[in-house]
């Protein structure tokens, strides 16, 4: 996936790079927008103009020099992540100009890469940005967590945290369609209302203003069967306390911990896992993409038939990518956060 930088460089690409290590709270000043040389494509390479790029909470993990699951990104290096774009120039016969492709070369307007580093996708009948969400990492994460790992049965109670976000909103709807009672949390009253009135979840709390232990005890006096965890921290502890014996938890993310000194910290209520015989399964979405055809086909059909609501928060302009990213950690998005770099092409 190495970008070729060795050829004659006649053009420039606008790129967002990591300018400094973030402090306790990530800031737009931690990034810089720079011009970088853009070579002509060599044999077997393509030049792509990005249309949309993804910003996701997991990207935070590589930005500091703390020990963790991701190696620290060097200062001055381009931010990477999911992107969907169009081939502008090609020396790869299988990818002629005009082909829509996905890649991990996000946070830039254009790039040159080996053809093997991009994947051709259909431009027919699909909003291109969906490949960064519903038909990409987001949709696969929610689908794997609900349909393959937890597989809750009708009548069971499932708790979904961060339910107004990209993954949470899909997970909550999938669980609801399995006949479950779905309870959830979100970070604003507006999101709480959307989850109740539009997604028709059974009970929703604003975690910023609600005692979660009291909320779960009131809404689930018999306990929780399943928990889909997107946030970690105190919410995970509250869920463990409220779980039924032999309950099941899928750990998808821990966004509440990503700006803390020890984002890998485990739950404070650890021993209750043993007392209750709780099963906790980690969700690494990369292990599930071999079932992508099945999952994406099902998700696309549900949206097309009105059974699934898919929301995007679209921010215009590559220069606003840092702000879009930072805003994820204060819950300013509903559904998937996407940056429109050059949507018209």
Image: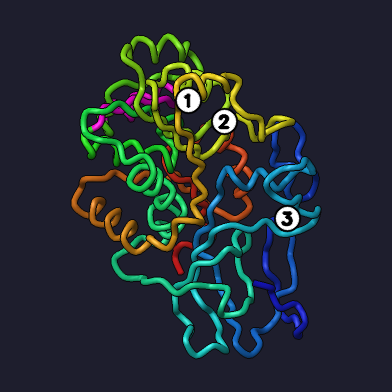
Which residue is identified by label 3? 17
Q: Earlier in the sequence, mark 2 or mark 1?
A: 1
> Left or right: where does residue 244 sit relative to residue 175?
right
Please state which of residues 45 and 109 is positioned toward the viewer in this rendering: 45
Residue shown at 26% from the left, 27% from the top: 181
Task: Please identify the quarter of the rendering in which residue 9 is found.
Answer: bottom right
Query: How far is disc 2 from disc 3 in space, using C-alphas?
Result: 22 Å
State the image coordinates of residue 312 (x, y, percent, origin top left).
41, 46
Asked if the residue at tag 3 contacts the one at tag 1, i.e. Cβ–Cβ closer than 8 Å, the answer is no
Numbered range of the magenta stretch: 180-197
Quadrant of the image occupied by residue 225: top left
Judging by the rendered image, the residue that carries numbered circle 2 is 330
- Dot 2 and dot 1 residues touching (CB under 8 Å): yes
Badge 1, how many Cα within 10 Å: few under 14, some, many 20+? many
The residue shown at (55%, 46%) is 56
For numbered disc 2, what is the local secondary structure? helix
Element assignment for label 3: strand
Work out whether 143 lies above or below 344.
Answer: above
How far apart, in angstroms, are the residues tagged by discs 1 and 3? 29 Å
Q: On residue 187, which mark appears? A: 1
């Amino acid at each position: 996936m190495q970008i070729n930088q060795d050829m004659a460089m006649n053009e420039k690409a606008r790129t967002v790079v990591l300018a400094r290590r973030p402090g306790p709270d990530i800031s737009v000043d931690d990034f810089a927008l720079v011009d970088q040389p853009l070579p002509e494509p060599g044999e077997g390479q393509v030049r792509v103009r990005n249309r949309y790029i993804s910003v996701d909470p997991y990207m935070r993990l590589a930005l500091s020099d703390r020990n963790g699951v991701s190696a620290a990104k060097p200062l001055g290096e381009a931010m990477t992540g999911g992107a969907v774009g169009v081939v502008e120039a090609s020396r790869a016969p299988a990818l002629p100009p005009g082909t829509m492709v996905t890649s991990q070369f996000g946070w830039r307007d254009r790039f040159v890469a080996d053809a093997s580093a991009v994947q051709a996708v259909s431009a027919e009948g699909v909003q291109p940005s969906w490949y960064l969400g519903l038909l990409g990492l987001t949709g696969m994460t929610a689908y794997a967590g609900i349909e393959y790992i937890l597989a809750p049965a009708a009548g069971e109670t499932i708790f979904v945290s961060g339910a107004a976000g990209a993954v949470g909103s899909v997970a909550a709807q999938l669980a609801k369609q399995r006949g479950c009672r779905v309870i959830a949390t979100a970070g604003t009253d507006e999101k709480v209302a959307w989850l109740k009135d539009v997604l028709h979840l059974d009970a929703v709390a604003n975690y910023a203003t609600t005692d979660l232990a009291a909320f779960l005890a009131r809404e689930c006096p018999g306990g929780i069967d399943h928990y889909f965890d997107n946030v970690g921290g105190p919410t995970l502890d509250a869920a463990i306390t409220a779980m039924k014996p032999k309950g099941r938890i899928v750990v998808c993310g821990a966004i509440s911990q990503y700006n803390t000194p020890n984002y890998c910290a485990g739950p404070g209520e650890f021993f209750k896992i043993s007392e209750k015989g709780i099963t906790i399964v980690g969700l690494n979405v990369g292990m599930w993409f071999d079932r992508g055809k099945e999952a994406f086909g099902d998700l696309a059909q549900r949206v097309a038939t009105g059974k699934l609501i898919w929301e995007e928060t679209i921010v215009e302009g590559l220069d606003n990518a840092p702000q879009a990213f930072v805003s994820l950690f204060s819950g300013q998005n509903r559904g998937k956060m996407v940056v429109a770099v050059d949507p018209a092409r």
